[in-house]
Amino acid sequence: MAHHIGAARVDPIPLTRNVDGDSLAALLAETLDHLPRVCSHRVARARSHESTAMSHSGSTHRALPAVSQAQFLSCLSEAGKRRDGAPLDVAACLTAAGFSTQLSSITLSADTPLTHALLCGVQFLNCTIDWCSFNASSLSGSQFIACNLRNASFIDASIENCLFRDCIMREVMMACASLDGVGFERCDLVIGSFENARILSSRFDTVTMAGTHFLNAEVRDSSIRNSNLENSVFFDVLRDFDVDSDSRKTVGTTRPTAVLPVDPADRGTSIPRVLVKLDQAAGMIPLRIAMRSPSIDRRKFDHEIGVALQRIAVSPAGGLPIPQRLLQTVDDDPETFAQLASITAKAKTLSANVNAIVLPGGEDIPSALYGEEEDTPRSGSDYRRSLLELALLRESLNRGVPMMAICRGFQLVNVYFGAKMLQNVEGQRGTRDFNLTQGSRNGIYGEAMRETLASVVSHHQAIPVSAQSLVEHLKPSVVHEGLVEAVESPHAGGVPALMLQFHPEFFRTEPMYRAPESFVSRSESLPMSAANQIFWQIFSDAAGAHRAKQAVIRELKGPRSVPPSASAI
C-alpha cells in the first residue's frame, strides 16, 4: 500500500499528544517530520515555491519588502481603525504600507484580527497559524505553503481557488465553509471538520485525514487521489467524491468513533483534555462536532425555541419533563420548527453512525429547561447546544449508544429526566475525595471506585440529593456534602452510561496544543487518583462492544441493509 499511495502517510498518525516538559522535544521532532518526507525537503520545496512565485509575480513583489511579525500586526491594527465596519482587505493593507503580500515565517494567533476579512492573493509561507480565526472571511487565490495550522477556524468562510500544500493541519474547523477550486496537496488533515461545508471542484491529493469528518457536507466535482483515508469519517458523502482505487482501499476505521461537541471559539479547559483521553486512554476516534452549528439561522432559531417553550408552558405536562416535551414538540411539528428539527436530525445522523457520545462540560444550562427563572438574569440563553445534546442523549438511550456525560453533561442528563438544579453553589472547585454509596458498589463505577477516589470538580451549579431523588430513571452513586456527583441507571442491561459531575479527564492530561492563556486556568495541577483513568477504560469497552455489535448486525442483515455511511467510514 505504501507504494501505491505514494507520499501520503501510511503509518498510523497520533491524533493527539500530551505536552509536558519531558515530551515537548519529542513532539517538536514529530511535528517537524510529520510528513513522510524530511522537513528539510519540505522547506526546500517551500523556498523554491517562494522564489518561483516572486520571479513570476511581476515587479510588485520584487519591489516590496517582506513584512515582519510586528509590522504585520501593526498594519492590521491601523487598518482596522479605519475600516468602519467593512471587511479588512489584508492585501490592500499590506501594499498600502509598502509591504509584499507574501507572509513568511510569522505566527498568527487568536489575537490576530482576520475574522470577516478579505484575503485575496495573500501567500502564507512557513507560517504558524495557531488558534487563529478566519471565520466569515473571503479567501481568493491565497496559498498556504509548508504552514502549521493548529486549531485554526474557517467557519462560514468563502475559500476560492486557494492552495494548501505541505501543511500540517490539526483540529482545523471548516464547518459551513464554501470551498470552490481548493487544493490540498501533501497535507496532514488530522481531527478536522468539514461539517456542512460546500466542497466544489476541489481536490485532495496525497493527504491523510485521520479523525477528519464530513458530516452533512455537500460535495460536487471534487476528487481524492493518492491519499490515506484510514480513520476518516465521511458519513454518506464519500460516494460524491471521485476517489481513485488505491485511496479507496484505505477507507475504514480501525477503532470506535465518538461524538464530541466543541466550540472552536471557546473550548475552555475540559474539552481539549476529553479529546486527548478519548484518543489515548479510550482508544477512540473523536469527531469534533460543532455544538452551535453555524448553519442555523440564529434569529429564526431563537424565535422557534421561544414558541416551543411557550407551547409547553400552556399545555398539560403529561408526566414528561420539559426537555423531553421540547423534543416531542419539535418531532410533532417539524415544519413550524424547521431550525430546531435540523438539529434533532443531526443528532439522529450522528447516533446512527458512531459508537459513543460525549456530553462535555461547559456553560450553565438554561433554567427554563427545568421550569425555573434564572437567579441571575443574563442577556439571553443560546439553546443550540442544549437542544443538540438533549437530542444526542435521547438517541443514545433509544439506540443503545454508550454515553459519557461530564459536569454540564451530567447536569443535563439529570434535567432531561426531571431533576431541578441549584443555580448557585460555592466552593465546588479543586480536588475532592469521593466514595460510592453502599448500594452502588456492584454498579458501573465499582471497579474505578473500589477505594476513595480523588478527582477534580469545577462547577457553580449542582444537583442536590433532594432534587435528584425524585428522578426514577437514575440513582445516585456518589453523594458529597448533599450534592449528587455521579448517577447510574438502576436497570441492569441498560445503555452503558457514565454520568459524572467531576472531571476524570484532568488526570495527567495536557492538550496537545495549549489554548490561549485567557482560556486556561493554571490551578488544575491537583493530586488525583490513578483510578480516574479507569473511567475511560470502561467507556472504551462499552464503545468497542457497540462497534462489534453493529458489525455483526450489518453482516447478518447483508450488504443491502448497510447504510451508505457505514461503507463510507
Image (cartoon, grey):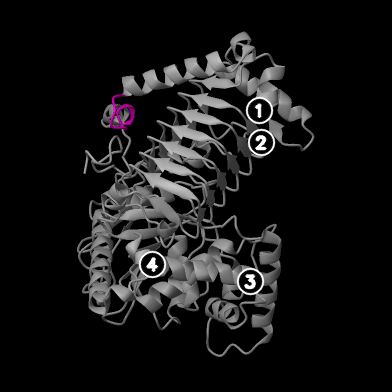
N-term mark: 2 or 3 = 2
**42 in relation to 217, above or below:** above
The picture places residue 549, in percent across and down from the top left corner, at: 24, 72
| Amino acid type for the residue under numbered disc 2 | Ala
Q: Give left or right: position of 274 versus 450.
A: right
Q: Disc number at residue 564?
A: 4
- Residue 231 is a magenta residue: no
Whether pointer 2 and pointer 1 mark residues with C-beta atoms closer than 8 Å, the reply is yes
Q: Does 33 appear in magenta?
A: yes
Q: Which residue corresponds to mark 2?
A: 117
Q: Circle 3 is placed at which residue position?
A: 338
Element carrying mark 2: strand
Q: Secondary structure at mark 3?
A: helix
Disc 4 vs disc 2: which is toward the camera?
A: 4
Between the C-alphas of marks 4 and 2, the distance is 38 Å
User: Looking at the image, do the residues carrying marks 2 and 3 touch, with CB atoms under 8 Å apart?
Assistant: no
Is 169 or 57 nearer to us in this picture? 57
The CA span between labels 4 and 3 is 25 Å
**Badge number at residue 90:** 1
| Residue 127 shown left or right of residue 155 in the figure | left
